[in-house]
């Protein structure tokens, strides 16, 4: 029973780690609930009133989730600055409680300053959020000048408990977080290999489901890789180590994605397009039995299981694990390849490359490994990795980017929009209720957070309203259950707050549901609960959403089309830079910081993906536009994959003994780069006459084999040309949905 239970527990842990990379959601939720529980305990022992305890609980929550800096000293400074800001905010709200007009005007000014403070980075954002939320809690508990000493004490206790939870109970160090992200990357990489195993054995009826699982696994792996890359500077001891980990993470991701694509191609009647891995809902190509003898299929299944074991194995490698590693790495040297078609043999070679990437990642993350059981092929792979590590160069200093000024600056524009929307919400909210109008203001404020276009505000407002509707029902039921039991209500509040913060990154609708349900309990604690109050909460939420949308549409609007076009232009510029730089280095040029350019491409693509969510949302009435946006993003993800692969190969060129520069590669990539630049010019409306060049296929350079059956350019150059060919096809494919005409070819 124990032996059977251990794998089950291990599998559950792997799934949990993979679902929450770095345990960031869990830590954030526990930290917030811990700070809140400590605050309630201290205030309860001190005999504080219920309203003071509610104020302390909200202050603890705000002071914990507002701070986003990554370095602990910076977090401590922001938390220390937040306390006087909170005290000033609650004092202002209490002193103006009897002066309605002046109080409303000051609230609007505070809202403008809080949003404008985002231009000063994480600290400005946190202090602005604290100022707004504490002013809001003052309205919520009905703060008056006579009750200020108690509120000051509650807020001070809340900030102290927040510091205790952050720095003592649930600390997050850069090194510890990097370790957890490393474990998450391994878990997600193993899950992707599991999905590939499922695809290997899938019947034609199961192919679509297996492909969807592999597509999701590929996307989740890429998401974790980006999270690691964004935290390398803080989580590694020096710049050289950061670049080494960045390179190994990129190699492992590319190797896993290439393995899946080759496996799909081997099972298909025709070559599988990379787009198939990136277009959600795209049907799987017609699949059949893997060509070749049954022994080859059984060997491939065994090797995929061995690869998964290598990924998940931690600690000292024993003889059995070393044997698995040696067997897989031998495929890189054409050893022990089974008698099968070239497509199937390519899958075995890809398994070998993936094993090599896993070994490189292990060395980068865990340090030198035992070499006593190395075979000659393993020793050669290890020598290649050592040579690449020694060739790391210091990155170039990034150039300063031009910053917009005046009303064109995003923070200024957002501050004006939120101030106007909040003014409308105050007026409309007071018409609905003279005592709880602030719910409309809160909703208007929230729908503008982390949004940059009218479409994003519409989607966020819709999700908040939907979550509020269901939360009202839940609040009614919970209030009926707890009745007047104060501590039972506080216990449920803690549970709902944990759920709120744990689900926030996954679903804004769920977060809104838990918030509204929690408010029903808080009203019960304050003895102001009634059916009418929760219905009013729903009405005020709808009003706040409407005011936010009106302000976004009428005041300095940023239309979704404009924002997506700007981000699309940025993605295309980054794609052209990476492709041109990789081709130049592969042709013998000297280019630095290729993987950093590739990371910038991934970040730009992530921004575009987020900005297109309003266009691809299921409730959008414009079906054709939704399909077009999804297709363009999928094509760009395909382009980014091939560009990353080219950059990773080019990074190996200075030190890899089996890769030599080929001057022809720069010419082969020239047309693709010009086409990317032409599309970018059309999108930016800089050159409305730009057209797409077509001509001989880059793949035509691959025709013919040497006498011994190997590609005539060598395996690495052959792979580079195939990446260029598929990148060229994807770029030409962008022309149709983006309405860029093809140039007429001379006869």
Image: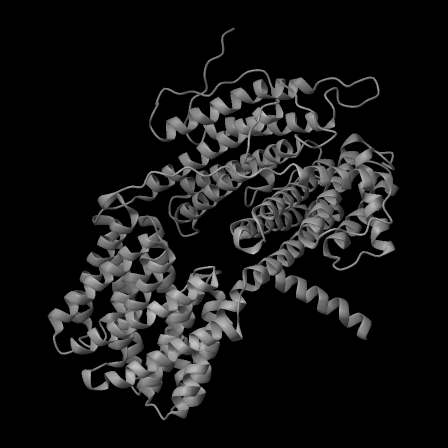
Image position, residue 71 (x, y; %): 47, 60
Provide residue 195's location: percent of width, then percent of height.
69, 51
In the image: residue 176, left or right of residue 450: right
Q: Residue at x 72, y 47 (%)?
A: 358
- Residue 162 shown left or right of residue 90 in the figure: right
Judging depth in this view, the residue of 655 and 582 nearest the camera is 655
Colour option used: one colour
Q: Name, please, the residue furthest toward the top.
A: 747
Q: 365 or 263, which is in the foreground?
A: 365
Query: Going 73% across and 68% down the picture, which residue do you hit?
Result: 8
Q: Is residue 304 rendered to the left or right of residue 27?
A: right
Q: x, y (%) of residue 626?
A: 43, 43
Residue ID at (86%, 55%) = 320
Residue appearing at x 86%, y 35% in the figure:
335
The mark tally for this picture is 0
Percent coordinates x, y for residue 658 in the rendering: 74, 29
State which quadrant residue 525 falls in. bottom left
Instruction: Quadrant for residue 244, please give it.
Output: top right
**Rendered-image quadrant of the N terminus:** bottom right
Q: Is residue 261 visible?
A: no
User: In the figure, 438 relative to 578: above or below?
Assistant: below
Whether residue 124 is visible: yes
């Amino acid at each position: 029973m124990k032996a059977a239970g251990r794998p089950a527990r291990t599998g559950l842990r792997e799934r949990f780690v993979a679902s929450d990379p770095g345990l960031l959601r869990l830590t954030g939720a526990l930290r917030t609930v811990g700070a809140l529980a400590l605050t309630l305990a201290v205030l309860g022992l001190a005999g504080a009133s219920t309203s003071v305890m509610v104020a302390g609980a909200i202050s603890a929550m705000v002071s914990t989730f507002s701070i986003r800096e990554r370095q602990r000293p910076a977090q401590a400074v922001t938390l220390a600055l937040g306390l006087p800001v909170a005290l000033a905010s609650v004092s202002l709200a209490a002193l103006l409680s009897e002066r309605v007009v002046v109080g409303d005007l000051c609230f609007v000014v505070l809202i403008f300053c809080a949003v404008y403070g985002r231009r000063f980075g994480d600290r400005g954002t946190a202090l602005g959020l604290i100022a707004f939320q504490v002013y809001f809690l003052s309205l919520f508990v009905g703060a008056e000048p006579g009750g200020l000493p108690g509120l000051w004490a509650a807020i001070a206790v809340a900030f102290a408990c927040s510091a205790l939870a952050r720095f003592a109970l649930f600390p997050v160090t850069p090194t510890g977080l990097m370790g957890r992200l490393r474990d998450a990357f391994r878990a997600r990489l193993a899950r992707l290999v599991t999905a590939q195993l499922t695809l290997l054995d899938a019947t034609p009826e199961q192919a679509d489901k297996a492909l969807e699982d592999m597509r999701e696994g590929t996307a989740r792996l890429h998401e974790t890789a980006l999270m690691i890359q964004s935290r390398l500077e803080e989580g590694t001891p020096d710049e050289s180590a950061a670049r080494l980990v960045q390179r190994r993470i990129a190699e492992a991701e590319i190797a896993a994605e290439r393995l899946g694509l080759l496996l799909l191609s081997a099972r298909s009647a025709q070559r599988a397009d990379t787009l198939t891995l990136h277009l959600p809902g795209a049907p799987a190509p017609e699949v059949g039995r893997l060509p070749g003898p049954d022994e080859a299929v059984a060997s491939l299944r065994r090797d995929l299981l061995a690869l998964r074991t290598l990924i998940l194995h931690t600690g000292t490698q024993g003889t059995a694990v070393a044997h698995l590693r040696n067997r897989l790495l031998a495929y890189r040297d054409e050893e022990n390849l089974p008698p099968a078609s070239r497509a199937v043999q390519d899958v075995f070679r890809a398994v070998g490359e993936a094993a090599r990437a896993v070994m490189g990642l292990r060395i980068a993350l865990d340090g030198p490994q035992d070499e006593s059981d190395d075979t000659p092929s393993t020793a050669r792979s290890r020598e290649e990795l050592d040579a690449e590590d020694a060739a790391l160069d210091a990155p170039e200093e990034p150039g300063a980017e031009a910053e917009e000024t005046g009303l064109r600056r995003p923070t200024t524009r957002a501050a004006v929009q939120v101030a106007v929307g909040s003014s409308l919400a105050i007026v409309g909210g007071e018409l609905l209720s003279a005592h709880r109008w602030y719910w409309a203001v809160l909703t208007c404020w929230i729908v503008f957070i982390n949004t940059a276009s009218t479409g994003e505000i519409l989607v966020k407002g819709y999700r908040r309203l939907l979550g509020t509707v269901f939360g009202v029902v839940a609040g009614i039921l919970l209030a009926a259950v707890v009745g007047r039991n104060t501590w039972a209500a506080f216990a449920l509040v803690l549970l709902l707050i944990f759920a709120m913060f744990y689900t926030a990154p996954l679903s804004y609708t769920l977060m809104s549901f838990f918030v509204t349900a929690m408010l029903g309990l808080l009203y019960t604690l304050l003895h102001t609960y009634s059916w009418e109050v929760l219905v009013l909460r729903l009405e005020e939420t709808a009003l706040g959403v409407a005011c936010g949308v009106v302000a976004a549409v009428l005041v300095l609007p940023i239309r979704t089309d404009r924002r997506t076009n700007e981000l699309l232009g940025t993605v295309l510029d980054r794609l052209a830079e990476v492709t041109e730089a990789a081709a130049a280095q592969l042709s013998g040029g000297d280019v630095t910081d290729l993987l950093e350019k590739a990371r910038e491409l991934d970040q730009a693509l992530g921004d575009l993906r987020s900005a297109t969510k309003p266009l691809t949302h299921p409730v959008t009435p414009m079906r054709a536009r939704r399909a077009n946006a999804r297709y363009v993003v999928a094509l760009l993800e395909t382009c980014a994959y091939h560009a990353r692969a080219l950059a990773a190969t080019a990074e190996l060129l200075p030190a890899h003994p089996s890769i030599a520069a080929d001057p022809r590669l720069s010419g082969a990539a020239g047309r693709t780069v010009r086409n990317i630049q032409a599309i970018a010019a059309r999108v930016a409306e800089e050159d409305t006459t730009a057209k797409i060049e077509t001509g001989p296929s880059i793949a035509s350079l691959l025709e013919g084999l040497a006498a011994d059956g190997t590609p005539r350019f060598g395996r690495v150059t052959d792979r580079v040309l195939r990446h260029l060919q598929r990148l060229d096809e994807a770029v030409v494919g962008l022309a149709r949905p983006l309405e860029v005409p093809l140039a007429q070819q001379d006869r």
